[in-house]
Image (cartoon, helix red, strand yellow):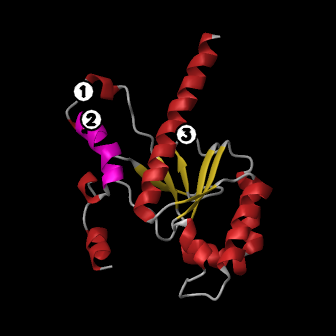
Amino acid sequence: REKGSRIARKRFHVGMYPRTLRTILDPFSRRLREGHEDMKKITPPTIIIDTREQTPLFFPACVPTRRATLKTGDYSIAGYESEFTVERKSLPDLVNTVIHDRERFERELERMQTYRFRRLLITAPWSRVLSGDYGFSMANGRAVMASVHAFEVRYGVPAVFVDGPQAAATRVVWWARYYVREREKEEELGKTK
């Protein structure tokens, strides 16, 4: 925790992120800084962070972010707010949602059905969710996991389990990057037909 609080006070840079995220971002940010010709064509997608997100994920400096109120979800992409949404849940938030705030959450999942790209991003490994060894709740892990699977099937929103907030930030960056790339390809194909 001490390390995390020190990080929160610093300006974020690529070196602070786990190796996986550095692998993605180092070449990108270096080439951008050095002004490579091919990088002038690439503008990294701006990640929109919902203003109601209390503890937002931290993204490296080379990934532009902006706070805005989103209709649904916690993260989106500028220009694609009505197509791309990611709802993030920490383990305590997931357990609380399943046990105490289920109706509100199901309304949110219903709204997510209209989005072309939608994900439920859980910042805990599935084995931890399943174990039920939470320390903050007596909830049954199998019941929580069963609810997550029911949400996936009922609302068509895939759940993705990652090992913590940094891995979640990596996943959002990848999804945003590839979503924008695929949408631009589709738009280009539409123009040529």
Do callouts 3 and 1 mark residues in contact (Cβ within 8 Å)?
Answer: no
**Circle 1 residues within 10 Å: few <14, some 14–19, many ≥20:** few
Residue behind mark 1: 36
- Separation of residues labelled 3 and 1 (CA atoms): 25 Å
**Circle 3 residues within 10 Å: few <14, some 14–19, many ≥20:** few
Residue 148 x/y as whole percent: 69, 65
Report the side of 2 relative to 125 (left or right).
left
Residue behind mark 3: 79
- The residue shown at (51%, 66%) is 123
Q: Is residue 90 visible in this depiction of the protein? A: no
Question: What is the secondary structure assignment of the residue under circle 2?
Answer: helix
Res. 26 mark: none
Q: Is residue 4 above or below residue 39?
A: below
Q: Residue furthest left?
A: 34
Question: What is the secondary structure assignment of the residue under circle 1?
Answer: loop
* Snapshot quadrant of residue 2: bottom left
Do callouts 2 and 1 mark residues in contact (Cβ within 8 Å)?
Answer: yes
- The residue shown at (72%, 76%) is 143
- The residue shown at (77%, 56%) is 153
Q: Is residue 185 above or below residue 138?
A: above
Report the side of 58 relative to 171 (left or right).
left
State whether the magenta stretch is mostly helix, strand or loop.
Answer: helix
- Separation of residues labelled 3 and 2 (CA atoms): 22 Å
The C terminus: image quadrant: top right
Range of residues picked out in magenta: 19-32
Question: What is the secondary structure assignment of the residue under circle 3?
Answer: loop
Residue 158 x/y as whole percent: 66, 53
Along the polypeptide, which appears first: circle 3 or circle 2? 2
- The residue shown at (25%, 73%) is 6
Residue 149 painted magenta: no
Mark 3, mark 1: which one is toward the viewer?
1
Res. 32 mark: 2
